[in-house]
Image (spheres, coloured by chain):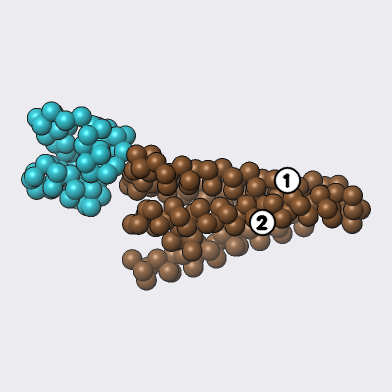
Chain colours: A brown, B cyan
Amino acid sequence: MLMKMFDTSDYDRSLRRRRLVAFGLLAVGITGIVCYLLLIHDSDVLSDYARGFYLGAASGMTIGAVVLLARMQYLLTHPEARKKAKIQEQDEREKAIINQAFQFAGMFTFFAAVASMFVLAAVSKTAALAVFGVVVVYAVTWLIANLYLSKKL
Amino acid sequence: MVQTSCAVRRDDMENRIAELRKARRISQAELAEAVAVTRQTIISLESGRYNASLLLAHKIARYFETTIEDIFLFEEEET
Protein backbone atom coordinates (compact mmCIF):
# COMPACT_ATOMS: atom_id res chain seq x y z
CA MET A 1 0.00 0.00 0.00
CA LEU A 2 2.78 2.38 1.03
CA MET A 3 4.81 1.50 -2.07
CA LYS A 4 1.76 2.03 -4.28
CA MET A 5 1.17 5.41 -2.64
CA PHE A 6 4.55 6.63 -3.83
CA ASP A 7 4.53 4.84 -7.18
CA THR A 8 4.53 7.79 -9.53
CA SER A 9 4.04 5.81 -12.76
CA ASP A 10 0.34 6.67 -12.50
CA TYR A 11 0.58 9.89 -10.56
CA ASP A 12 -3.14 10.69 -10.48
CA ARG A 13 -3.94 7.31 -8.98
CA SER A 14 -1.10 7.73 -6.50
CA LEU A 15 -2.56 11.11 -5.41
CA ARG A 16 -6.01 9.61 -5.00
CA ARG A 17 -4.53 6.84 -2.82
CA ARG A 18 -2.77 9.42 -0.68
CA ARG A 19 -6.02 11.36 -0.33
CA LEU A 20 -7.70 8.14 0.82
CA VAL A 21 -4.95 7.63 3.40
CA ALA A 22 -5.43 11.24 4.54
CA PHE A 23 -9.15 10.55 5.06
CA GLY A 24 -8.25 7.47 7.11
CA LEU A 25 -5.78 9.44 9.24
CA LEU A 26 -8.35 12.20 9.72
CA ALA A 27 -10.92 9.66 10.92
CA VAL A 28 -8.42 8.18 13.40
CA GLY A 29 -7.37 11.64 14.60
CA ILE A 30 -10.94 12.86 15.11
CA THR A 31 -11.80 9.61 16.90
CA GLY A 32 -8.83 10.23 19.19
CA ILE A 33 -9.93 13.81 19.96
CA VAL A 34 -13.54 12.75 20.58
CA CYS A 35 -12.39 9.91 22.86
CA TYR A 36 -10.13 12.33 24.70
CA LEU A 37 -12.96 14.82 25.27
CA LEU A 38 -15.57 12.23 26.24
CA LEU A 39 -13.55 9.59 28.05
CA ILE A 40 -10.03 10.66 28.87
CA HIS A 41 -10.25 14.37 29.77
CA ASP A 42 -11.88 14.01 33.19
CA SER A 43 -10.75 10.47 33.84
CA ASP A 44 -7.98 9.76 36.34
CA VAL A 45 -7.13 6.40 34.80
CA LEU A 46 -4.26 7.95 32.85
CA SER A 47 -1.54 10.18 34.26
CA ASP A 48 -1.28 13.84 33.18
CA TYR A 49 1.67 12.91 31.00
CA ALA A 50 -0.27 10.09 29.26
CA ARG A 51 -3.30 12.34 28.75
CA GLY A 52 -1.13 15.07 27.25
CA PHE A 53 0.49 12.53 24.96
CA TYR A 54 -2.94 11.20 23.94
CA LEU A 55 -4.25 14.65 23.05
CA GLY A 56 -1.01 15.62 21.34
CA ALA A 57 -0.98 12.48 19.19
CA ALA A 58 -4.66 12.84 18.23
CA SER A 59 -4.29 16.56 17.42
CA GLY A 60 -1.06 16.02 15.51
CA MET A 61 -2.63 13.27 13.44
CA THR A 62 -5.69 15.41 12.70
CA ILE A 63 -3.67 18.46 11.68
CA GLY A 64 -1.33 16.33 9.55
CA ALA A 65 -4.30 14.65 7.86
CA VAL A 66 -5.98 18.00 7.11
CA VAL A 67 -2.75 19.38 5.60
CA LEU A 68 -2.24 16.23 3.52
CA LEU A 69 -5.86 16.24 2.41
CA ALA A 70 -5.72 19.90 1.38
CA ARG A 71 -2.47 19.33 -0.53
CA MET A 72 -3.81 16.25 -2.36
CA GLN A 73 -7.07 18.01 -3.22
CA TYR A 74 -5.15 21.01 -4.53
CA LEU A 75 -2.90 18.85 -6.71
CA LEU A 76 -5.82 16.82 -8.03
CA THR A 77 -7.67 19.94 -9.10
CA HIS A 78 -4.73 22.01 -10.42
CA PRO A 79 -3.02 20.33 -13.43
CA GLU A 80 -0.07 22.75 -13.56
CA ALA A 81 0.75 22.30 -9.87
CA ARG A 82 0.30 18.54 -10.28
CA LYS A 83 2.78 18.48 -13.15
CA LYS A 84 5.36 20.39 -11.09
CA ALA A 85 4.84 18.15 -8.06
CA LYS A 86 5.23 15.04 -10.21
CA ILE A 87 8.51 16.27 -11.66
CA GLN A 88 9.71 17.20 -8.17
CA GLU A 89 8.90 13.71 -6.87
CA GLN A 90 10.33 11.86 -9.87
CA ASP A 91 13.49 13.94 -10.15
CA GLU A 92 16.42 11.53 -9.83
CA ARG A 93 18.72 14.10 -8.23
CA GLU A 94 16.13 14.80 -5.53
CA LYS A 95 15.84 11.06 -4.93
CA ALA A 96 19.63 10.72 -4.73
CA ILE A 97 19.79 13.58 -2.21
CA ILE A 98 17.09 12.01 -0.05
CA ASN A 99 18.77 8.59 -0.19
CA GLN A 100 22.17 10.00 0.73
CA ALA A 101 20.69 12.08 3.54
CA PHE A 102 19.01 8.94 4.91
CA GLN A 103 22.29 7.03 4.65
CA PHE A 104 24.15 9.75 6.49
CA ALA A 105 21.47 10.14 9.17
CA GLY A 106 21.29 6.36 9.64
CA MET A 107 25.03 5.97 9.96
CA PHE A 108 25.33 8.93 12.31
CA THR A 109 22.46 7.69 14.51
CA PHE A 110 23.94 4.20 14.62
CA PHE A 111 27.36 5.36 15.79
CA ALA A 112 25.83 7.91 18.19
CA ALA A 113 23.68 5.15 19.71
CA VAL A 114 26.69 2.84 20.11
CA ALA A 115 28.70 5.65 21.72
CA SER A 116 25.83 6.57 24.03
CA MET A 117 25.67 2.98 25.29
CA PHE A 118 29.05 3.46 26.96
CA VAL A 119 27.69 6.43 28.90
CA LEU A 120 24.30 4.87 29.63
CA ALA A 121 25.82 1.63 30.88
CA ALA A 122 27.34 3.60 33.75
CA VAL A 123 24.11 5.48 34.52
CA SER A 124 21.18 3.18 33.80
CA LYS A 125 21.32 -0.45 32.77
CA THR A 126 17.70 -0.31 31.49
CA ALA A 127 18.39 2.69 29.26
CA ALA A 128 21.58 1.05 27.96
CA LEU A 129 19.63 -2.12 27.13
CA ALA A 130 16.94 -0.05 25.34
CA VAL A 131 19.58 1.63 23.18
CA PHE A 132 21.25 -1.75 22.61
CA GLY A 133 17.86 -3.05 21.42
CA VAL A 134 17.59 -0.18 18.93
CA VAL A 135 21.11 -0.89 17.63
CA VAL A 136 20.27 -4.60 17.23
CA VAL A 137 17.01 -3.75 15.39
CA TYR A 138 18.95 -1.42 13.10
CA ALA A 139 21.59 -4.09 12.37
CA VAL A 140 19.00 -6.83 11.73
CA THR A 141 16.92 -4.52 9.51
CA TRP A 142 20.03 -3.58 7.55
CA LEU A 143 20.91 -7.26 7.10
CA ILE A 144 17.42 -8.21 5.93
CA ALA A 145 17.26 -5.22 3.56
CA ASN A 146 20.70 -6.11 2.23
CA LEU A 147 19.71 -9.74 1.57
CA TYR A 148 16.44 -8.68 -0.04
CA LEU A 149 18.08 -6.10 -2.29
CA SER A 150 20.90 -8.52 -3.21
CA LYS A 151 18.30 -10.89 -4.61
CA LYS A 152 16.12 -8.20 -6.14
CA LEU A 153 18.76 -6.12 -7.91
CA MET B 1 62.62 -1.55 -2.51
CA VAL B 2 60.09 -2.98 -4.85
CA GLN B 3 57.65 -0.47 -6.20
CA THR B 4 54.32 -1.87 -7.20
CA SER B 5 52.72 -0.50 -10.30
CA CYS B 6 49.37 0.02 -8.73
CA ALA B 7 47.81 2.72 -10.84
CA VAL B 8 45.00 4.76 -9.38
CA ARG B 9 42.30 5.32 -11.90
CA ARG B 10 40.23 8.46 -11.79
CA ASP B 11 37.08 8.38 -13.82
CA ASP B 12 35.71 11.67 -14.99
CA MET B 13 32.53 12.40 -16.83
CA GLU B 14 32.00 15.60 -18.71
CA ASN B 15 29.04 16.57 -20.77
CA ARG B 16 28.01 18.93 -23.54
CA ILE B 17 24.53 19.70 -22.26
CA ALA B 18 25.15 23.43 -21.77
CA GLU B 19 26.80 23.70 -25.19
CA LEU B 20 23.95 21.91 -27.00
CA ARG B 21 21.32 23.77 -25.04
CA LYS B 22 22.84 27.16 -25.87
CA ALA B 23 23.19 26.18 -29.52
CA ARG B 24 19.48 25.48 -29.60
CA ARG B 25 18.72 28.65 -27.64
CA ILE B 26 16.64 26.98 -25.00
CA SER B 27 16.61 27.74 -21.32
CA GLN B 28 17.51 25.36 -18.50
CA ALA B 29 13.87 25.42 -17.43
CA GLU B 30 12.70 24.40 -20.91
CA LEU B 31 15.16 21.53 -21.08
CA ALA B 32 14.21 20.48 -17.55
CA GLU B 33 10.55 20.39 -18.48
CA ALA B 34 11.25 18.44 -21.68
CA VAL B 35 13.12 15.66 -19.86
CA ALA B 36 10.91 15.80 -16.74
CA VAL B 37 13.46 16.87 -14.14
CA THR B 38 13.84 19.99 -12.04
CA ARG B 39 15.81 22.98 -13.28
CA GLN B 40 18.23 22.43 -10.40
CA THR B 41 19.09 19.00 -11.83
CA ILE B 42 19.99 20.57 -15.18
CA ILE B 43 22.15 23.15 -13.38
CA SER B 44 23.94 20.37 -11.46
CA LEU B 45 24.41 18.30 -14.63
CA GLU B 46 25.84 21.23 -16.54
CA SER B 47 28.24 22.12 -13.77
CA GLY B 48 29.34 18.49 -13.45
CA ARG B 49 28.29 18.14 -9.83
CA TYR B 50 25.82 15.40 -10.66
CA ASN B 51 26.03 12.52 -13.13
CA ALA B 52 22.85 11.57 -14.93
CA SER B 53 21.41 8.08 -14.73
CA LEU B 54 21.30 6.02 -17.90
CA LEU B 55 17.59 6.74 -18.23
CA LEU B 56 18.05 10.51 -17.96
CA ALA B 57 21.07 10.41 -20.27
CA HIS B 58 18.89 8.60 -22.81
CA LYS B 59 16.11 11.19 -22.45
CA ILE B 60 18.57 14.06 -22.92
CA ALA B 61 20.18 12.39 -25.93
CA ARG B 62 16.78 11.78 -27.49
CA TYR B 63 15.81 15.40 -26.86
CA PHE B 64 18.93 16.66 -28.64
CA GLU B 65 18.47 14.00 -31.35
CA THR B 66 21.91 12.56 -30.84
CA THR B 67 23.64 9.72 -29.00
CA ILE B 68 24.52 9.44 -25.32
CA GLU B 69 28.23 9.19 -26.21
CA ASP B 70 28.00 12.45 -28.11
CA ILE B 71 26.74 14.29 -25.03
CA PHE B 72 28.39 12.49 -22.14
CA LEU B 73 32.15 12.29 -22.52
CA PHE B 74 33.63 9.60 -20.36
CA GLU B 75 37.33 10.02 -19.75
CA GLU B 76 39.41 7.41 -17.99
CA GLU B 77 42.56 8.85 -16.54
CA GLU B 78 45.48 7.00 -14.99
CA THR B 79 47.46 8.82 -12.30
Q: Residue at x 10, y 31 (%)?
A: B24
Give, as a three-letter code, the residue at label 1.
Answer: Gly
Mark 2 Cα shell of 10 Å, populated few (<14), some (14-19), many (≥20): some
The chain holding disc 2 is A
Asked if residue A114 lies left or right of residue B16, the reply is right
For the C terminus of chain A, the image quarter is bottom left
Asked if residue A51 lies left or right of residue A129, the reply is right
Location of residue B37 with respect to A139 vertically, above or below: above
State the residue lying farthest toward the front: A77
Q: Residue at x 65, y 55 (%)?
A: A27
The answer to whether one can see residue B20 in this image is: yes
Q: Nearer the viewer, residue A22 or A132?
A: A22
Which element type, helix, strand or loop, lies under badge 1? helix
Residue underneath mark 2:
A28
Q: Residue A151 at x, y = what percent?
A: 37, 71
Q: Residue A50 at x, y = what percent?
A: 81, 51
Give, as a three-letter code, the residue at label 2.
Answer: Val
Q: Residue B63 at x, y = what percent?
A: 14, 44
